[in-house]
Amino acid sequence: MLNINEQRLLSDLKELSEIGKTSAGGVNRPALSELDVETRNWFKTKATEAGLTIDQDGAGNLTATLPANNPDAKVLLAGSHLDSVPNGGRFDGPVGVLSALESLRTIKESDLDLPVHLRCISFTDEEGSWSSLIGSRAFIGEITAQDLTQVRGGVAAFDEALARIDCTRETVLQAKCDPSDYVGFVEVHIEQGTRLEQQQLNIGVVDEIVGIQWYWLKFLGEAAHSGTMPMADRKDANWGASLFVQRAKDIVKNDFFPGVLNCGQAQFKPGAFNIVPAEVELALELRHGSKEKLDQMEQIILDVAKSSAAEFELDLEVKPVSKVPPAPMSEHVISNIEKAASGLGLSNTRLMSFAGHDTQSLSAIMPASMFFVPSVNGISHNPKEFTHEEDVVNAGNVMLNSLINLAQNIT
């Protein structure tokens, strides 16, 4: 088995972590920010120094390519993202990009002749500073002009941010790749959970990425004086919303394992100490790896919202936001990752990913899968996010040998 230059990988990760470093030890590099631009320039420099070919598409996705001897060869793609959530951790995303970059450098230095072009990619805005998975969705041609008018922060600010990397909304819409050029995609990521750590396993190979459905639920009651309106006569919108959250939580826990539900935001109106809430708007998120189960969960949970509202004589408005379907992974890619991990003597298992990743976009147009390395205590999107050096090195070595396996076993 071929091995990466582990000190070079760890040094790159340490060096990259200085860009946007926070006082708590994390990083703050939101997509298309000035710090993101600095990160992009850093990546270009590293790839150029390695003798790789640098390109940027209309969505700002950056690639570094190690060409095959045959100019007409297909492309085997690997990577992740370099942007971060605000005040996030230094491993989420960069471990994937740097493992792919180091794999290409190692293969180049070994003079290994493979029948594919190898390409490392860093996708734009995986974390959703503007809109989730912009880069990978543009790459597969899934993003629309309307999507780009509904970005977080507003269109004017988005246009200004895109200009920092010489892109526009129009170029984003033109970033679609030709799927016939590609034979597959591999991503490595920190787990952002505790399953590998608890089972003392080195590698988790992802066989499915959950689907996600988002809604705004608005419970509508009647404002009243909080002191003088008798409790029995109130139409308290919060009572309906609170009852819904408890009922929905129990249903998902008991009937839809391992699916999950989250209500991560609530807005009260009028929003005063002494006024009975007339309106509560609640953010609802549902996740499951089975489309059938996710659809069943949606129907039952929305029915629970209606019945919870009715119990307190409230009205209910349901506003769908967006849906991401579950993404099954390629068995061919999975088996080659497992072969690499086992060949390196690393314990491994198959896992479902409960977080969204660029791989779910790529899986729609080419064979794709990803694998995880452990996260200490499962902490992520937090400056305390941490993955041990040996696990970072394992990420690089499994990526390297997965790419070699896949290149030598093109389907």
Image: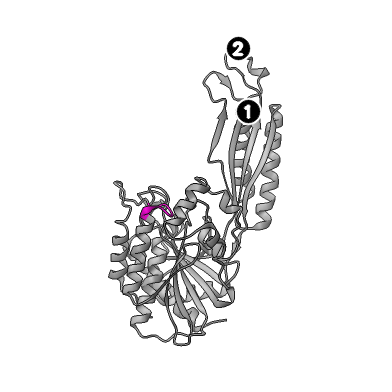
Magenta-span inclusion, residue 352 = no
* Quarter of the image with the N terminus in it: bottom left
Looking at the picture, tell me which residue is in the foreground, 371 or 108: 108
At 57% from the left and 50% from the top, the residue drawn is 149
Magenta-span inclusion, residue 34 = yes
Instruction: Name which quarter of the figure residue 174 lies in.
Output: bottom right
At 50% from the left and 77% from the top, the residue drawn is 75
Report the side of 15 relative to 381 (left or right): left
- Residue 53 against residue 35 in the figure, above or below: below
**Residue 237 tag number:** 1
Residue 281 coordinates in the image, percent (x, y): 60, 35
Residue 333 coordinates in the image, percent (x, y): 53, 73
Describe the element under mark 2 as helix, strand or loop.
Answer: loop
Describe the element under mark 1 as helix, strand or loop.
Answer: helix
Q: Is the magenta stretch mostly helix, strand or loop?
A: loop
Instruction: Name which quarter of the figure residue 270 lies in.
Output: top right
Q: Give the range drawn in magenta.
A: 29-35
Q: Mark 2 points at which residue?
A: 228
Of the residues under marks 2 and 1, which one precedes in the sequence?
2
Q: Which amino acid does label 2 sit on?
A: Thr
- Residue 84 against residue 182 in the figure, above or below: above
Q: Residues within 10 Å of mark 1 (few under 14, many from 20)?
A: many
Looking at the picture, tell me which residue is in the foreground, 180 or 227: 180
At 60% from the left and 12% from the top, the residue drawn is 228
